[in-house]
Image (tube, rainbow, N blue to C red):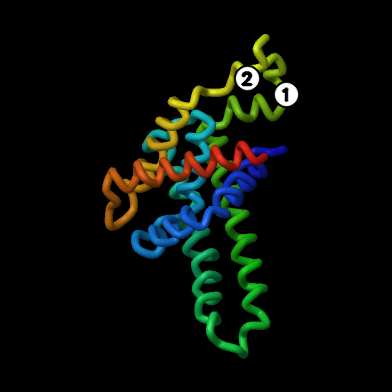
Amino acid sequence: MSSENIFWRWAVALWSSSELESQLLELQEGHGLVVLELLFAAWLGDQGVKIAEPDRLALQTACDGWVKGVVIPLREQRKQWADDPETQWCRGAIKALELQAEKKLSERLVAVAQEQGLLRELQADLDGINENRVNEDGVDKNRVDKNSVDEATLHNITCILDAVSPPINESAAITLAQLVASVAHTNEKIN
């Protein structure tokens, strides 16, 4: 499975949390957050990868034109047609296009992360290079410990939230990072 598919499945699974969805949509509407960008940064954190400012800028650049030129116009049209009975027949098609545009954005984010060198270890695992991953106790030797993952996730979410306007306070970033980690952990147990 490719990095794009792994990230996309992870993001869709997190989106199934109504509490997380509600918080992310609130940040999207009130602060201009690109939800998929934040989820991607959180996913990188879940892989034990911390982003630096150049990485955040590269991810933001990958998002900006696509989100402003494709995703937002589709979203706005879908919202405009929400209460119009004459357009209900094609609202579902617009929603499907919006979802495909988001999926394409996820591919763009993965491509940028690969260019930035953020996915080397993950890609090596996907390619089967790290075959001897499990120790004699059955523990994945390459899996980053939970504290490092939580720290990377909080760091990455904070990096993304520091760039939105108006700014988000640190306690909101911590709360969001804890929610993302909790939902991701719950989904990991289910899958």
Label 1 vs 2, first from the N-terminus: 1
The image shows residue 120, relative to residue 183, as above or below, that is above
Give me the residue at 61% from left, 29% from top: 122
Quarter of the rendering occupied by the C terminus: top right
The crowding category of the residue bearing disc 2, from other C-alpha atoms within 10 Å (few below 14, some 14 to 19, many at least 20), is few
Which amino acid, by three-letter code, is at mark 1?
Gly
- In the rendered image, residue 189, in percent from the top left (x then y), is placed at 62, 37
Give me the residue at 30% from left, 56% from top: 165
The image shows residue 20, relative to residue 190, as above or below, that is below
> Which mark is drawn over residue 42?
none
The image shows residue 187, relative to residue 18, as above or below, that is above
Residue 22: quarter of image: bottom left
Which amino acid, by three-letter code, is at mark 2?
Asp
Give the left or right position of residue 89, taking residue 57 as reference.
right
Residue of label 2: 140
> Which mark is drawn over residue 128?
1
